[in-house]
């Protein structure tokens, strides 16, 4: 018959107390070693989130000069407004700020940002991603304006839910801009007359449409749709053409001087 083997227990009370303390100490050292090996992976990310908060300009939008004031009033009071003139005059910023203001106040339901996908020496096809990701590089400057006026979180939310739409001009075919929409066409000097006709005939009742560009900086050969449209719309009710001059540049004095050197003729 097999005999059970039992661990021999010490009958000395002091020995038992010693062994109990030793076991507790060993357990404590083991836990300390385990704790020391724990690495909190998200600690740095939380620090970055705390240190950086996307900036939002909460002050009411105000034009910087008389030219911008006239342009802003034209957008507010007309169905279709053309803003033409040199870079740095605030055409995009004024239009973007008014669109953001209208969306935030609930006067409109959607902002549409569009421009012709014309490369200025670079090829769109070499950019990574699908068409939305490729086009994002073309509209980044305008998104910065919306981020400043609405906050990056609000802009991202509205982009996901279709309240802010950014798409190439070619994608406007077949659409109708309704009364709840604020539409901005940028870099209009790079449209053809046919593209501009297609875009302008999307306009529905009571929507707000702004067309911006500089006829002197076209990246296409031949006549451009912006110049052609300006000549055609003269005298139409609800349509205004606002022309900025070089003295209206607010970006910097250096930009004015550089344009003087590039456009000596």
Image: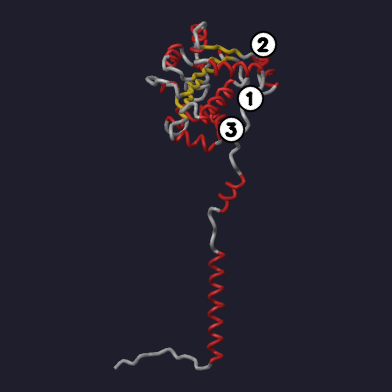
Residue at 42% from the left image edge and 17% from the top image edge: 202
Q: Which residue is mark 3?
A: 148
Give residue 191's position: percent from left, percent from top. Answer: 48, 16
Say what secondary structure mark 1 lies in.
loop
Residue at 43% from the left image edge and 32% from the top image edge: 162
Quarter assignment of residue 248: top right
The disc placed on residue 62 is: 1
Residue at 50% from the left image edge and 26% from the top image edge: 107
Q: Is residue 65 visible?
A: yes
Residue at 66% from the left image edge and 22% from the top image edge: 64
Say what secondary structure mark 2 lies in.
loop
N-terminal of the pair, mark 2 or mark 1, is 1
Q: Which residue is mark 2?
A: 264
Give residue 168's position: percent from left, percent from top. Answer: 45, 24
> Alpha-carbon distance for marks 2 and 3?
35 Å
N-terminal of the pair, mark 2 or mark 3, is 3
> Alpha-carbon distance for marks 1 and 3?
14 Å
Quadrant position of the C terminus in the picture: top right
């Amino acid at each position: 018959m097999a005999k059970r083997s039992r661990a021999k227990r010490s009958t000395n009370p002091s020995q038992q107390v010693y062994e109990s303390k030793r076991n507790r100490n060993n357990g404590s050292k083991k836990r300390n070693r385990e704790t020391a090996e724990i690495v909190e992976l998200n600690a740095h990310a939380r620090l970055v989130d705390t240190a950086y908060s996307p900036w939002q300009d909460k002050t009411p939008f105000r034009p910087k000069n008389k030219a911008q004031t006239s342009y802003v009033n034209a957008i507010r009071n007309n169905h279709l407004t053309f803003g033409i003139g040199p870079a740095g005059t605030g055409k995009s910023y004024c239009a973007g700020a008014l669109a953001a203001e209208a969306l935030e106040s609930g006067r409109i339901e959607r902002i549409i940002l569009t421009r012709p996908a014309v490369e200025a020496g670079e090829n769109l096809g070499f950019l990574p991603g699908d068409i939305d990701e490729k086009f994002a590089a073309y509209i980044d400057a305008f998104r910065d304006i919306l981020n400043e006026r609405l906050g990056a979180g609000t802009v991202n939310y509205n982009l996901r839910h279709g309240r802010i739409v950014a798409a190439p001009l070619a994608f406007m075919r077949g659409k109708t801009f309704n009364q709840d929409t604020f539409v901005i066409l940028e870099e209009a000097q790079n449209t053809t007359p046919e593209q501009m006709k297609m875009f302008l005939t999307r306009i529905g009742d009571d929507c707000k449409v702004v067309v911006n560009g500089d006829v002197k900086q076209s990246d296409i050969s031949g006549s451009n749709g912006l110049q052609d449209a300006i000549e055609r719309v003269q005298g139409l009710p609800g349509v205004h053409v606002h022309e900025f001059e070089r003295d209206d540049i607010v970006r910097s004095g250096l930009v004015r001087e550089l344009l003087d050197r590039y456009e000596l003729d």
